[in-house]
Image: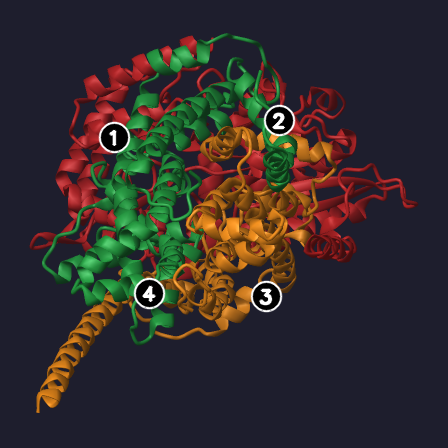
Chain colours: A orange, B red, C green
Amino acid sequence: MRNTNVHHEKKKYLDSVYNRRRIFTLINFILLAAGSLLILSPLWWMLSTALKTMQEVMTYPPSFFPSEWKWDNFVKTWQAAPFDLYTVNTVTITVIVVFGSVLVNSFIAYGFAKIPFRGKTILFGLVLSTMMIPGFVTLIPQYVLFAKLQWINTYYPLVVPSFFGSAFFIFLLRQFYLTIPNELIEAAKMEGASHFYIWWKIGIPLTKPAMATVAVFSFNGAWNDFLGPLLYLNDESLYTLQLGLQVFKGEMNTQWNYLMAGSLLVLLPVILLFFFFQKYFIQGINLQSGNK
Amino acid sequence: MFKRRAILLIAALFLLLSGCAGFKTGAVNQKASDGDEKVKVDFWTFWGSEIRRPVVEKIVEDFNKSQDKIEVTHTFVPWGDIWTKELAAIAANSPPDVVINDINATALRGKKNQAMNLSQFLEKDDISGDFYPELWEATLYEGDSYGIPFNTDTRILYYNKDAFEEVGLDPEKPPTTWEELEEYAAKLDKKDGNTYDRIGFYPLWGIQSDVWMLNADGVNYFDSEGEVSIDTDANRDTLDWLVKWREIYGENTINAYQAQIDSQQGNPFFNGKLGMFINTPTFYTQIRDYAPDLNFGVAKLPERTEGSGHTSWGGGFVAEIPEGSKNAEEAWEFIKYLTGAEAQEYWAVKNFDNVANIEAAENAAKSDEMSETDRMVYQMAVDNMDETLLTPVPVNAPDFTNLINPEIDAVLLGKKSSEEGLKAAQAAVEKLIEKNK
Amino acid sequence: MAKKKPLHIRREGRQGYIFILPWIIGFVVFTAGPLLFSFFASFTNYDITSQMDFIGFANYEQLFTGDQLFWTSLYNTFYYVLFSVPLTTLGAIFLSALLNQDVPGLRFFRTVYYLPAILSGVGVYLLWMQLLEPGSGMVNTVLAWFGIAGPNWLFDPAWTKPALIFMKLWGVGGGMLLYLASMQGVSQSLYDAAGIDGAGRWQQFRYITIPMITPVIFFDIITSLIGGFQIFQEAYVMSNGEGGPVNSMLFYNLYMWKKAFEAFDMGYAMAMSWILFVIVFIITIINLKLAPRWVHYEGEDN
């Protein structure tokens, strides 16, 4: 009797937790869905412009739906410039940059977060400082530097710096390393492990979500980079997608439909990548908590 | 272990990529030494669109075929950013050989040693007489030219003939003075309750207040001696006149239309919601493409009072040789071809663009490759060149507009009187010039 | 005389330098030169191509005493930072909290919210110019459904900066990525313990999640501040490079860009950049000093 009563109480409690959770989930879902509409509506505008004829684009007031869905705009856009080649170029640059960024920044950040050495604070201050100088004023001297290295019209200026760390990513990964308990590191050191070993075997696995973040950010950065390729590439056969998109923007008038179609096409691989890459944010192994 | 693996991986990656075109160094700006002996001339433009690109590449191809010593390569660099890139390349002493650049800052670039002084070439081939004098004038710094005019533009009045007819105006008699402009605009206005079905005219759509100041007395901000002449009677009257227009139509109507025009989508002139509109002759190509049935006419800008002049405003581009070009002689040969009558006429007809070469412009206006309407507009553009003034960037105050524009904005928004605004602008620009002397 | 540290500490220190060596090399080779150059050139009338004469503090003096636009641009930039940084930070945390739950379609939502962050460049700003168009742009059309008469956004000097901040908020999902990654690190056992103690969701969020992700909040604030002070491209595109109306979009970097690449007064622009550097540096130092009061590191070294 008594037993069933307890059981009953517990069930009631669990039910109420369950119900509350359900309501919470529902509210959450509604909020997210409403927000998604807000986020997506500008993109809808983009898509509908991409599907219109130029004639319709030029009609006022703009219509929400194309009167005639010109799907072949996408084909025409792709043919307006050698976009196949630009894709290969962009992928080449991006892959190298992501590889370099993820590996090297993690290495450097570990050093700043977990190894005591003299002058660390000042050096880290210097790392942060490099972010605070507006890029315009170093643009010309940097170009001259790369010209002296004979790197103009090559991909070196675009990819090599990513193998020497970037302040933003170093800072980011350092923040994540700082959340790893020191006891873990100390224990490994007791067993005679070097910091290189600890970084590779403990550091990297523990900061996987952060490294995934760096991967996505650096992918984005390289994929969307405009100024770098603009400055450093002279041969059109080396151009990237972002430069290719500029053919639709003239000094007087813009081919809106093609520009929007092109922007969407360039966006697509990034969306897909992000969609499938997400599990790495979720699957970060977490020693301190023990959850998966 | 892992370290070695990582290093190996990186090494392998670089080995793999060193075969890729983007990783071959030292391919820039070398004098051609391989067999064929042709000198390579690097030519940068911002003409990458479906329409312009084939035209410029045809000109390049024709030039390459016309002789066997020079090989010009055309490279598209995005609009606007092309000049940042050019500047960086000049700073690194590895510039291209010919670049299309803004005519209005040519003197400034000459002063700054960015563009090459062309007088050495002009001594041998004086082509200065081939171009509109006003354009040529703009390329000079201390008497020497730093760029050869390529194309240009001007501002003309477009008006809707059907709308004229509808309200009883003679469709063959566009307004010729500011007064007529106001009168016609009022007639063309069509109001439905609080909103307009059609607006007759508003002076600041398509052009800005500086063009009207220029139109009023031939001077907007700097007189012919280069003295600051912002705070003048003519400018004050012009601003007051513009404020009057603003009050007629009201803030909201103006902004709504303005945004439509600025967004480059759906100009209200296309569908008859605007009776008259001032823009460049190339604006016609949009009418042709997007509103082919519009019955319109073109005219010179009205004058402030009878006899004050139908002064219009223009700009354009020059072909220049950046300082440091290794192939200046060959670049000059190409520029001569590019700005010569044949190439210019081809450009003019194919792009419906105003060219700097007088002979080419006049031939284009008669070209049978163009339709009758094409020719009507083009002829007006050519005629209008006599009235067109350029306002080159003053070499002592290249960025003066940020001092003037806010004052003028404030006047137009009714936050300042025209006296106050122009006085403040005059003082600020004088101070800037003083500082830069 | 410094005491000699024990061998293993020194050896560890050496390892530390090896770890940061790539950055040091990169800094020395790629960054230090151009930075030093820009510092020295800020005391000259450097114009890239024709002159570079030492003029002492003239650029700095002119900026502080004779250049109204310098103050205008500084004001605009502070205005933007003051609103955009807190709003985007709060927005991103809130959004991540929602996206860190079990919700149907989670993957889809995460992708959608991250989309604006991927979209970058001129095309997006051109798109927003159309959306913000006062007459029939989508923003004002939607506002009208709720009976709100939308402002003239980019045409009204009072609304240009709010318009840019609004646009920035659209891209709030960019920060979400960081917070999600960091929320993944918060121990489930902490929540379980709190749940047993009867803490509600809000309390769990407030007293567990937030403190545990403070290192990333800190990162986000610092980098957003640095980035916010450097706002450029949106203003450049959306004001046609002019910074108008009434200079309301003339941000610090836009003004600097105009000085550097329109007037070719590069020395002056370099002086401007170092002033901005000092401002941002001071703000960052203040933040670093305040950090120990609220940032919680699980594994901080002593």
Q: Distance between the residues labelled 2 and 3?
A: 42 Å
* Labels 1 and 4 in the same subunit: no
> Left or right: where does residue B295 sit relative to residue B23?
left
B368 sits left or right of B311 in the view: right
* Marks 1 and 4, how far apart at CA: 58 Å
The nearer-to-camera label among 3 and 4 is 4
Q: Residue C33 carries which label?
A: 2
Looking at the picture, which amino acid does disc 3 mark?
Answer: Gln
Tell me the number on the disc at residue A79: 3
Query: For this rendering, which residue is in front, B226 or A129?
Result: A129
Give amino acid for label 4: Gln
Which numbered mark, 1 or 4, is in the foreground of this view? Answer: 4
Looking at the rendering, in which quadrant would you find the N terminus of chain A?
bottom left
Discs 4 and 2 carry the same chain letter: yes
Local crowd at mark 3 within 10 Å, few (<14), some, or many (≥20)?
A: few
Residue at x-position 15% and y-position 81%: A10
Spatial separation of the CA atoms under disc 3 and disc 1: 43 Å
Q: Nearer the viewer, residue B292 or A244?
A: A244
